[in-house]
Image (cartoon, helix red, strand yellow):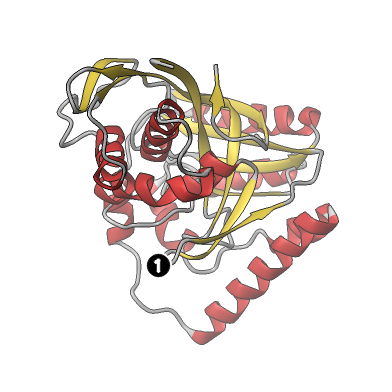
C-alpha cells in the first residue's frame, strides 16, 4: 500500500471513577485521516480541514507521534498526513488522542504492521504528552484497542481491555467553548484525603466488575467522583443542572468527559440515551449556549480502515 484512509474515533476518559486510567471509545464522531508514503524521508502535515490545528510537524500531535515511531523503525521513505479534523481540540473527547493514535496506526499499516495496536500506544503517547502536558494513555488505549480500557500503569503501559455490556449507549454534550487539558489539570490538587481515595478505588473496582457481569445497577452506583469532578465542575457551564437532568431522565450515570467541557452520560439502551440528550440540550438552549450532541454506542473496534 502507498496510502491508507482511516476513521480515528473520539473517546471518553476518566469515566467518573477512573481518573487517568479508565476510558471508552465512541463510534459516532472521529477524525478522518489519509496517510501517504512519500519519496522524501520524514513526516509532513498536508491538508487540514475542519478545525484549526498546526501544520508545523514539530507542533502537530499526529506528526510528533509518527516521528516517535520512525525513531525506532527507520525507513528510507516518508509520510504525508492529511487530516479532516472532526473532533474540536479542547472539547474533552480525545481530540489529540484521535490524531496521535490515528497517525501511528495508519503509518503502521503502510509499514506492514510491524507493531500491534497495543504496542502503538507508546508512540502515540509522545503526541498526547505534548498536547496535554502529561503522558497518560486513558484516551489513547480505547481509541487503539476499542471498547473500555483500564491503564494499570502509565509508566509500563500495562493496559487491560475490558468487556462492554451490550446495551450501553453514551450521550455526549459539547458546549462550544474550549478547555485545554493542560489548563484543567492545573487546578487539581496534588494530594487527596485517604477517605476520598478509599471511596474512589472502591467505585473503580466495582465499575470494572459491572462491565464483566453486565450489572447495570452496580455500574450506576459506581459512577461517582469525589476527587476530580468537584474541582473541575466550576469550569463547565450548568454542569450540576445537566448532570441532574441526565440522571432524572434515566441515565445510569453522568460526569465530565476527560478534562471537559464536554459532559457524558451512560444509559441502558438508545431510547434512554436520546432522551438524556434532549434533557441536556434543553439546559444549554435555555441560556443560548451553542453545543453539539452525540449519541453513540460503545465502539468495540477502535480505529477503522475506510
Image quadrant where residue 60 sits: top left
Q: Picture coordinates of residue 119 (x, y %)?
A: 47, 50
- In the image, 107 versus 271, the foreground residue is 107
Q: Going 26% across and 54% down the picture, which residue do you hit? A: 133
- In the image, 81 versus 149, the foreground residue is 81
Question: Crowding at label 1, few (<14), some or many (≥20) Cα neighbours within 10 Å?
Answer: few
The quadrant in which the N terminus is found is top left
Q: Going 59% across and 62% down the picture, which residue do you hit? A: 17
Q: Picture coordinates of residue 174 (x, y %)?
A: 47, 32
Left/right of residue 211 with respect to residue 286 in the rendered view:
right
Left/right of residue 289 with respect to residue 126 in the rendered view:
right
- In the image, 213 versus 190, the foreground residue is 213
Left/right of residue 78 with respect to residue 15 in the rendered view:
left
Q: Picture coordinates of residue 137 (x, y %)?
A: 44, 53
Q: Going 18% across and 36% down the picture, which residue do you hit? A: 59
Is residue 282 visible from the viewing direction of this image? no
Is residue 3 visible from the viewing direction of this image? yes
**Residue 110 against residue 34 in the figure, above or below:** below
Count of number-bearing discs: 1
The quadrant in which the C terminus is found is top right
**Residue 189 against residue 136 in the figure, above or below:** below
In the image as oriented, which residue stretches furthest toward the front?
A: 76
Q: Which residue is mark 1?
A: 155
**Residue 301 against residue 79 in the figure, above or below:** below
Q: Picture coordinates of residue 276 (x, y %)?
A: 69, 34
Amino acid at each position: 500500500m502507498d496510502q491508507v484512509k482511516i476513521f480515528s474515533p473520539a473517546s471518553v476518559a476518566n469515566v467518573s471513577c477512573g481518573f487517568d486510567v479508565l476510558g471508552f471509545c465512541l463510534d459516532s464522531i472521529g477524525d478522518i485521516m489519509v496517510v501517504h508514503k512519500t519519496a522524501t524521508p520524514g513526516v509532513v502535515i498536508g491538508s487540514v480541514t475542519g478545525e484549526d490545528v498546526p501544520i508545523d510537524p514539530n507542533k502537530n500531535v499526529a506528526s510528533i507521534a509518527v516521528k516517535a515511531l520512525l525513531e525506532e523503525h527507520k525507513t528510507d521513505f516518508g509520510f504525508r498526513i492529511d487530516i479532516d479534523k472532526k473532533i474540536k481540540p479542547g472539547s474533552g473527547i480525545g481530540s489529540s488522542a484521535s490524531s496521535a493514535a490515528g497517525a501511528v496506526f495508519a503509518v503502521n499499516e503502510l509499514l506492514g504492521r510491524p507493531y500491534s495496536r497495543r504496542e502503538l500506544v507508546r508512540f502515540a503517547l509522545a503526541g498526547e504528552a505534548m498536547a496535554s502536558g502529561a503522558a497518560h494513555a486513558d484516551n489513547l488505549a480505547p481509541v487503539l484497542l476499542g471498547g473500555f480500557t483500564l491503564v494499570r500503569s502509565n509508566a509500563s503501559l500495562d493496559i487491560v481491555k475490558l468487556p462492554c455490556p451490550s446495551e450501553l449507549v453514551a450521550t455526549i454534550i459539547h458546549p462550544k467553548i474550549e478547555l485545554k487539558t493542560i489548563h484543567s489539570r492545573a487546578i487539581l490538587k496534588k494530594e487527596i484525603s485517604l477517605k476520598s481515595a478509599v471511596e474512589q478505588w472502591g467505585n473503580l473496582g466495582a465499575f470494572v466488575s459491572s462491565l464483566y457481569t453486565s450489572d447495570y445497577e452496580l455500574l450506576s452506583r459506581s459512577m461517582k467522583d469525589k476527587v476530580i469532578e468537584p474541582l473541575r465542575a466550576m469550569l463547565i457551564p450548568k454542569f450540576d443542572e445537566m448532570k441532574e437532568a441526565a440522571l432524572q431522565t434515566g441515565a445510569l450515570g453522568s460526569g465530565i468527559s476527560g478534562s471537559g467541557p464536554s459532559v457524558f452520560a451512560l444509559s441502558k439502551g438508545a431510547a434512554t440515551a436520546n432522551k438524556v440528550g434532549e434533557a441536556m440540550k434543553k439546559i444549554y438552549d435555555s441560556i443560548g449556549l451553542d453545543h453539539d450532541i452525540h449519541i453513540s454506542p460503545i465502539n468495540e473496534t477502535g480505529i477503522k480502515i475506510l
